[in-house]
Amino acid sequence: MSPATPPYPERIPTAERVAFLRQPAAYQGGVRSVETRETRMSWVFLAGERVYKLKKPIRDRWLDFTTLAARQRNAHEEVRLNRRLAADVYLGTARLTVENKGALAIDGTGETIDWLVVMRRLPAERMLDRAISAHKVCASEVDRLADLLAEFYRQRAPATRSIDDHIGYFLDQQRVNHAIFADARVELAVGQYAGILDAIDRFLVDESDLLAKRVRNGHILEGHGDLRAEHICLEATPIIIDCLEFNRELRLVDPFDELADLALECSRLGAEWIGDTLQERCATVLDDRPPQRLLAFYTICRACLRARLALRHLLNPVVRTPDRWLPLAREYLERAESARLILAAPPAVRPATRPGGNDGSPPQTAAPH
């Protein structure tokens, strides 16, 4: 074998590994069928009462999963971090092994060629995004979710991060926004949304002191990193899965930045009251009420991020569900435009700080009856 030739297990292509994991016979316990889902970074296999996640051997500016050792480290880190908010869901890791004559197995006796994260399967109908769409979310469930998040944030120690690094993150994200939105391949009428990007640029020049103050006052911590409705299960004790495990820098956030992300998603799904409730209860527990213009800035940035991630699908060599991404990006940008109007208002007529109000008035929260 020449020095440039990888060892035999590394020459088993991802497609072959995925094909094996699609088969019910790959799993113990009499699995009858396997549902397979593909994300940008992973293959996910729903097999009976368990879920198995296989990372793709990819690399980008934030991660590198191209080696077996890197995928092993990431699998263990994914379990460790997600047990913070889903202790009994993340069961551990499993090895994908190659046996005699090249047969594959899960936790076999042969050589390890990959690593899997093993999870308890959650009821799909109780995931927050599905429950919102089915109009099956009640106020008490949202209160319990808010209490869980508030306690999670309360227990996190302030992260060590400089003001320059924190503001620099937003500047860097804005550079990517400009590049993606202007890319002719995404067919986005960028002129229609220029005001959104201008609002972010102006805020980072004129009001970056609000971001600096959050750092100085110890409000930046290691959070979840990807707080989305589809990652929340409304069991008796709420469960939050799929944190952003591959890069700690991306988990260093203001809690109200993450909450703005979740509020944005709930609003897009038609349940704005959920975001209002979460922000207000967390503000009360944490005794922390950021100014409304900062929350609006967070909302704009998160909306642009979600739009950008949708548009990136159109830049792939092979585009899955191509008709989905441009309308989704426009939905998020419409939400960003609504938040931009808050920043555009003169200071004298800006609404009171939210959640709650600086004048002691209650927050404008509308929960269902």
Image (cartoon, helix red, strand yellow):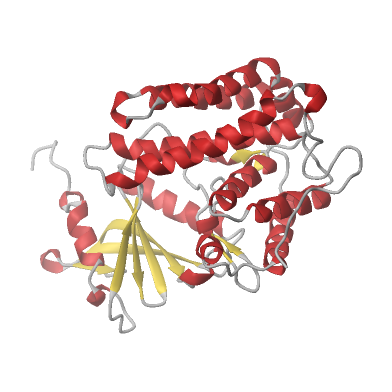
State the residue lying farthest toward the right: 360
> Image check: 156 left or right of 16?
right
Q: Image point 27% across, 37% down: which residue?
A: 316
Q: Quadrant of residue 188?
A: top left
The x and y percentages for residue 294 are: 70, 32
Asked whether 77 or 309 is in front, the reply is 309
Please tell me whether residue 57 is drawn above or below residue 162 in the rendered image.
below
The x and y percentages for residue 305 are: 49, 36
Q: Quadrant of residue 52?
A: bottom left
Asked whether 41 or 249 is in front, the reply is 41
> Image check: 167 left or right of 97?
right
Residue 168 visible somewhere in the drawing? no
Residue 18 visible somewhere in the drawing? yes
> Image check: 23 left or right of 326?
left
> Image check: 6 left or right of 333?
left
Q: Image point 65% across, 46% down: which residue?
A: 259
State the residue lying farthest toward the bottom: 30
Asked whether 197 or 58 is in front, the reply is 197
| Quadrant showing the C terminus | bottom right
Please tell me whether residue 308 is drawn above or below residue 171 in the rendered image.
below
The x and y percentages for residue 194 are: 49, 21
State the residue lying farthest toward the left: 1
Q: Image point 62% across, 44% down: which residue?
A: 258
| Quadrant showing the N terminus | top left
Asked whether 156 or 174 is in front, the reply is 174
Q: Image point 50% across, 40% down: which residue?
A: 332
The x and y percentages for residue 341 are: 65, 29
